[in-house]
Amino acid sequence: MKKLLQKIAKKSPWLYRINAGSCNGCDVELATTACIPRYDVERLGCKYCGSPKHADIVLITGPLTARVKEKVLRLYDEIPDPKVTVAIGVCPISGGVFRDSYAITGPIDKFIPVDVNVPGCPPRPQAIIDGIVEAIKIWETRL
Amino acid sequence: MSSFLKIAIRNLLKGPSTDPYPFGETFVPKGLRGKIKYNAKACVACRMCEHVCAGGAIQIREVADKSGLEFILWHNTCAFCGLCEHYCPTKAIRLTEDYHTAHKQEDKYRYVEKGFIKYVNCAQCGTPMVPIASELLNVAYDQVNKDIEKLRHLCPKCRQERALR
């Protein structure tokens, strides 16, 4: 029974999006990738979910500002294992243009283990799809 | 009702509007600012790119054995703003239309664009100096004649002496 579930689960990872103080640029691109039929990540079997408890692949945007740090970490802990983390945009990866600011506690891999990076300011929808494809490959090995 | 049918039939004939990207070909808009390409041969190490870089992605520094300068650009903090390309006098930096940036976490710090500018020796006194690219001469002079071509191989000090003579 468990094996069967594993086999099925591989085909449909659920996506969850965390905004760690992003400027909304990457979030708009994520919305574009998800909602506009031209890009449509649901073709890959992915689905956006509203609750962190249902998530398999976590997409993080934003440089982890001091204000949201605790909330993001709490939210991240609620996501069940195994999970795959994708950092979208340059901010969560390195801090981007906000690096060394007093308001930033990131980069995000100081606190959260990241698996895939998709740099760009913001990345193109195709680049985000690339990152999600990469994440699905990792997700299949973790199940 | 009939207008709805018209639209439905038209859309049926048009086929899917989904871009087949991960499974097929995709499009790139013209003039898209993507990953940076660096050409060490055209670079004169004026360091303007390092100065204007919004994300602090560019570094130009001397290598350990002092044989030249090293250009390093970390893609993971580049914001694709294009200031480096705009201010580069010799167009040694170009923004390509390549936006495929996704990579694994292990490669995070290896995801760089590198270039090496080897010092050349001054034709007169032998002091090591950054080679002057022909691209820069084309920017500075209308026509590059033999005299200018000679000055190109001299260090600033020798160049001054030659000019004052």
Image (spheres, rainbow, N blue to C red):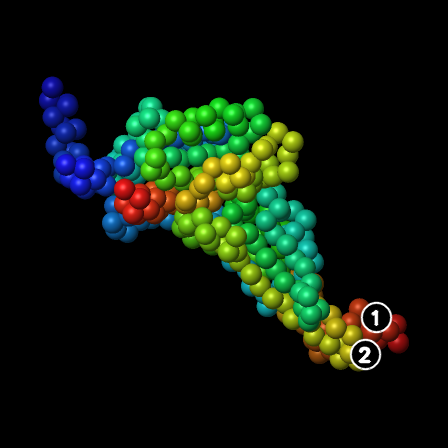
Residue A66 x %, y % = 58, 27
Q: Residue at x 32, y 35 (%)?
A: A56
Residue A113 x %, y % = 45, 40
B13 displayed left or right of A123 = left
Q: Secondary structure at mark 1?
A: helix
Instruction: Characterize the local packing of mark 2: few (<14), some (14-19) or many (20 or more) Cα atoms within 10 angstroms.
Output: few
Three-letter amino acid code at the position of disc 2: Cys
Residue A140 x %, y % = 27, 45
* Residue topped by disc 1: B157
Does residue A88 show up? yes
Q: Residue at x 58, y 63 (%)?
A: B115
Q: Residue at x 31, y 44 (%)?
A: A142
Residue B100 x %, y % = 40, 50
Q: Residue at x 53, y 39 (%)?
A: A110
The extreme front residue here reads A1
* Residue topped by disc 2: B125
